[in-house]
Image (tube, coloured by chain):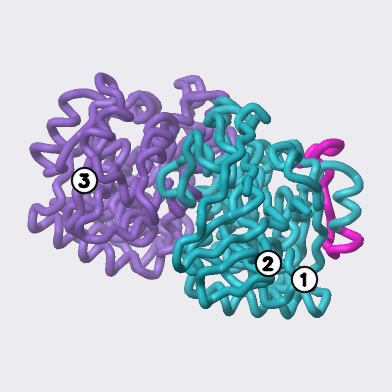
Chain colours: A cyan, B purple
């Protein structure tokens, strides 16, 4: 039987990801070895950090090299199993990569307990939600009454981070591109305010919307959003660097000229990776699930279709085409 | 009796400090009121943060406005007193400003207990040493065995921070301008290595001198030193932003393009101001005094002379002319 795949064909370090960074491939499926499971990929998850993984930065969530099948978390159905852990028909989650069939040792797969809400495991209950949870609560340390600003707030991580801040009793302002995304933030996700960076100046609007300054900044963007918010941080502020999607498009990304304000404001700017919190995933996931069930956290999925559209779907993230979690269904 | 002063004549925000930012003034001394003390200024202390004070940034160590007598800590001799706290002949420390005679309420002055080592109270036992102490130990959190890099290491704060790191069991590398300063760091202050940024590339030398990366960076400089060190930080590194003398000369200082490495390295970049630690000054000062007495901390003073040279002495800091603590003796 044939397996169709997308291989990495270029290293996008210092430039935007392009369709030509991927090349189509077809291989024969080898017979299963003992302990292995064959999975037919159903959904793939897309995340800006996949660009970082392609750049193969040591220490950052593993790495890929040219010629590898592109790394990606996904959910699929077990179609063949030589492990007692999974039976044919089970729904499983793991690094399925960009291919129709993934063949993995059973220990590298997790079970999707709730097939009716399977894609939540790639979103709010997956690394997206966990990144928002630990980044905001552990690195950002929000206190009730704080003003929290989230950049890229209509993205998968940002939208959850902002809602957790609201649950934590904070006033939440998000930045996003376009009126539709901003309306979604305020009307559906109950952010206190939204800044449309495509039509408004972040600097001016922050001054209006945060007259008492910013206590926590959860940054998914970098660039101007980071620099303008640094100018308005309060004494003791926490600046959580979660992502920097603005820099992914630039050959020589600029640093935040206002970084020195962390001295005047005795503030801290901190980066984090999710795997530092692995032992606490289950506890966090239980809370996130409760908030989902209660409607305290709402999410939206942008589900593209079809194997051929996989590379193009990654590119959507970098031009801000997605609202909420970017997924693709293979069938 | 006449009092000669230097008044602030310009706001150097976004540019270097110039001699024309100060203007000479002469006033008559008013009679002393109850509770006040008149002090004849003996030594003045110079610090890069004085430029920040001139820029009058809210919340940053008070502020000055054009027309004020330039703010500066100093030590002087009491020449007249209407307070029981001080008698004529006492040596006192406080915000004496750039003038021959300071008239202050007694409560704003401190006593210099050890007249033989009076200037230590403006250096290692003053805000210089306390800044190094709390910045390195509380914000940098060095562990024995860590590699600590200090930029501007031949400056007053940097030289003390590096020596405290050595006392804490760390490997210490300093950056400084010129062979003489570098030799002082390694030969006299017992740094493990020094990088002469005027004749060597920081990036290349850091790679050679810190093959296992950097755990703590104590930054007094900003600019290239900050950016190049961010590229070499270890997982969990602490980047202490103490000063940014490079940016003081630039109209549009650049931010550190490598800031995003704090994500890959799960690191933290933090600013601080000394006054957050006020309750602990005495305990810290006692330790610093012990280290001084034991020769564990060594210092050098650069003492300029004469009232007329006061503005020029501040400018020495920004062109790196000083080695160690910059002072001026009025008589």
Q: Nearer the viewer, residue A153 or B45?
A: A153
Q: Are marks 2 and 3 in contact (CB under 8 Å)?
A: no
Residue B122 tag number: none
10 Å neighbourhood of mark 1: few (<14), some, or many (≥20)? few
The count of marks equals 3
Q: The residue tagged with tag 3: helix, strand or loop? A: strand
Residue A200 among magenta residues: yes
Q: Nearer the viewer, residue A256 or A285?
A: A285
Q: Are marks 2 and 1 in contact (CB under 8 Å)?
A: yes
Q: Chain of mark 1?
A: A
Q: Residue at x 55, y 64 (%)?
A: A37
Q: The residue tagged with tag 2: helix, strand or loop? A: helix
- C-alpha gap between disc 1 and disc 3: 54 Å
Residue A121 tag number: 2
Residue at numbered disc 1: A117
Residue B46 higher or lower than B144, as above or below: above
Quadrant for the C terminus of chain A, please.
bottom right
Residue A230 higher or lower than A211, as above or below: above
For the magenta stretch, what is the residue range?
A186-204
Residue at numbered disc 3: B172
Q: The residue tagged with tag 1: helix, strand or loop? A: helix
């Amino acid at each position: 039987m044939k397996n169709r795949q997308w291989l990495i064909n270029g290293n996008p370090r210092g430039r935007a990801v392009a369709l030509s960074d991927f090349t189509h491939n077809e291989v024969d499926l080898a017979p299963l070895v003992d302990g292995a499971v064959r999975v037919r990929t159903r959904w793939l998850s897309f995340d800006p950090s996949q660009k970082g993984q392609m750049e193969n930065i040591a220490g950052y969530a593993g790495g890929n090299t040219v010629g590898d099948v592109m790394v990606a978390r996904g959910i699929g159905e077990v179609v063949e199993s030589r492990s007692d852990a999974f039976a044919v028909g089970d729904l499983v989650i793991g690094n399925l990569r960009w291919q129709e069939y993934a063949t993995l040792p059973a220990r590298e797969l997790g079970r999707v307990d709730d097939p009716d809400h399977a894609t939540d495991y790639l979103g709010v209950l997956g690394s997206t939600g966990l990144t928002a949870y630990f980044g905001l609560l552990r690195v950002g340390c929000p206190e009730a009454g704080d003003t929290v600003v989230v950049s890229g707030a209509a993205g998968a991580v940002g939208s959850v981070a902002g809602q957790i801040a609201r649950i934590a009793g904070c006033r939440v302002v998000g930045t996003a591109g376009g009126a539709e995304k901003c309306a979604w933030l305020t009307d559906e996700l109950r952010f206190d305010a939204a800044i449309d960076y495509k039509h408004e100046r972040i600097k001016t609007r922050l001054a209006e919307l945060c007259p008492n300054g910013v206590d926590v900044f959860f940054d998914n963007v970098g660039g101007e959003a980071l620099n303008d918010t640094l100018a308005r941080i309060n004494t003791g502020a926490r600046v959580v660097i979660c992502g920097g999607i603005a820099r992914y498009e630039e050959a020589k990304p600029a640093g935040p000229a206002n970084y020195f304000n962390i001295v005047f404001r005795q503030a801290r700017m901190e980066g984090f990776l999710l795997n530092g919190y692995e032992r606490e995933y289950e506890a966090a996931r239980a809370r996130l699930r409760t908030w989902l069930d209660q409607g305290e956290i709402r999410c939206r999925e942008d589900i593209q279709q079809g194997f051929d559209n996989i590379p193009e779907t990654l590119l959507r993230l970098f031009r801000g085409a997605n609202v909420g979690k970017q997924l693709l269904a293979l069938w």
